[in-house]
Image (spheres, helix red, strand yellow):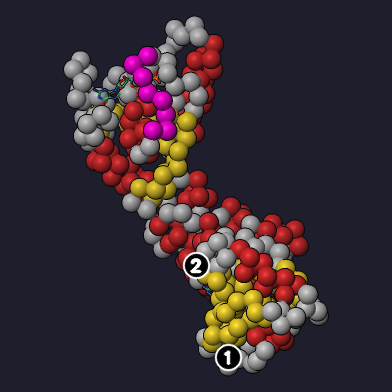
Amino acid sequence: MTDTIFAVSSGAAPAAIGVIRISGSVAGKALGLLAGRDFAPRRASLAKLSDAGGNILDEALVLWFPGPNTATGEDLAELHCHGGRAVLAAVQNALAVIDGLRAAEPGEFTRRAFANGRIDLAESEGLADLLSAETELQRAAAMANASGVLSGHVGSWRTQLLVLSAQIEAALDFSDEDDVSELPEGFTWNIAALTKELDDWLSRPGSEKLGEGYRVVLAGPPNSGKSTLFNALVESEAAITSPIAGTTRDVIERPVSISGVPFLFVDTAGLREDSDDEIEGIGIDRAKSELSRADAVLWLGEQNTGPVGALEIAARIDDDGHEPKAAPFASVSAVTGEGVSGLKSALVDLARASFPKPGEAALNARQRGLLSDARDALGGTQGQNDLLLVGEELRRARVAFDRLIGRTTTEDMLDALFGRFCIGK
Ligand SMILES: Nc1nc2c(c(=O)[nH]1)N(C=O)[C@@H](CNc1ccc(C(=O)N[C@@H](CCC(=O)O)C(=O)O)cc1)CN2
Ligand SMILES: Nc1nc2c(ncn2[C@@H]2O[C@H](COP(=O)(O)OP(=O)(O)OP(=O)(O)O)[C@@H](O)[C@H]2O)c(=O)[nH]1
């Protein structure tokens, strides 16, 4: 029998309310011991909670969810306590001494939901992303996966594959004597349609990019106003600005969300060839390597002197002696704020194209790897006349789909995934 687990599932104490969840076969008994009575299923009830010595620990709102139709698939109790540190400690201590109960590991509730078939692996990954989502775009993509959008597609691809495999099996049964093996009617067409669908998914922006943010590097010669614009974009005095050329030495990064889109802005040392300052020289090398990692470079230097593809920014437009550029991507004064919000919305438009569309399921690296395995296996059936080998490739594709949704898993992989969750999830 598996242990019954408990943990605080709400945020860090002290808080207004602290929710302790108890999942497993002893959850009902534990609830009875603390509250001294039974509870109607799926109803909120107010109850005094006491320890074994009869000391009242808290007055809490109690929920009782008998399994298996629960979030974890097991009997589940929730104690909505007052969220004080000592209250939650006292109730957890009272639970810890009950036979068969122990504190939960990180992600263990969700892992049980997975083990009990309440959610599959792609949905679990979506949940992990949902909990770490900080911007609206991240939330929407994670929610799509958590609610089974990707899983639904994989399920349908898998079913199509099983049908095709069955056709191959049947063809093999008929083609025994004369060694003539012919592909079933429509087979090639069906494989091509499925392949196209997988290619379409593989060409979409991946979900990691959502986590990292769209990387915008500010670059240009010293004193061009990079750090001042950087501070305006990230809305904090993150970088030191000064009239002294060569102020910024190191690379400074700040993540921010603009209109729900995740960005990582990067300020760099001013680029110049004649610096005899060793530290500034290192900063310049770092700035150059940032240029190659950027999703977009904002170039504050003279027109047409920046890296290929850089977005020309006319900066310091309030400042005399600063030449306007012809057809810049944006004209800004970070000091007066003119043009900054226009620049932000232009960047938002640019960045959106690199991200999954709002609410569209996106693939992470693991999922993309498996989908591309499946795609390669389908490709392996093309031009193949040996039905045994065709059947083998189809089996390979099915294994990839099975791994994607977690029909086959490894312990290491599950440890890594559920270890990402916090305690109580
Ligand atoms: N208080 C509380 N809030 C929470 C959770 C929780 O466990 N407790 N959740 C924790 O993740 C999330 C909600 N997820 C849940 C998922 C399934 C079920 C559940 O009981 N499912 C049953 C019955 C469904 C129904 O009544 O329609 C089922 O699927 O069979 C409950 C919560 C977010 N909010
Ligand atoms: N009037 C005006 N001054 C600006 C503007 N932006 C920057 N400055 C001034 O220009 C000087 C240089 O600005 P920084 O932002 O430090 O320039 P930088 O490109 O980061 O310089 P380095 O760190 O040397 O590479 C500072 O004195 C700023 O106050 C602007 O939009 N208008």
In the image, the segment drawn in magenta is 237-244
Please state which amino acid type lies under the numbered disc 2: Ala
Mark 2 is surrounded, within 10 Å at the Cα level, by few (under 14), some (14 to 19) or many (20 or more) other residues, namely: few
Residue located at (50% from left, 67% from top)? 16
Which residue in the structure is indicated by mark 2?
A: 16
Which residue carries the number 1 mark? Answer: 41
Main SS of the magenta segment?
loop
Q: Quadrant of the C terminus?
A: bottom right
Q: Nearer the viewer, residue 274 or 131?
A: 131
Tell me which residue sits at (67%, 89%) in the image. 36
On screen, 118 above or below 404? Answer: below
Q: Is residue 100 left or right of residue 17?
A: right
Q: Residue at the location (57% across, 82% down)? A: 62
Residue 415, position in %: x, y?
72, 60
Q: Find the distance from the CA under tag 1 to the CA under tag 2.
A: 25 Å
Does residue 209 appear left or right of residue 421 in this picture? left
Residue at image location 54% in from the left, 17% down from the top: 282
* 403 vs 67: above or below: above
**Spot occupied by residue 71 in the image (x, y as percentages of width and height):** 59, 78
* Residue 49 visible, this orientation: yes
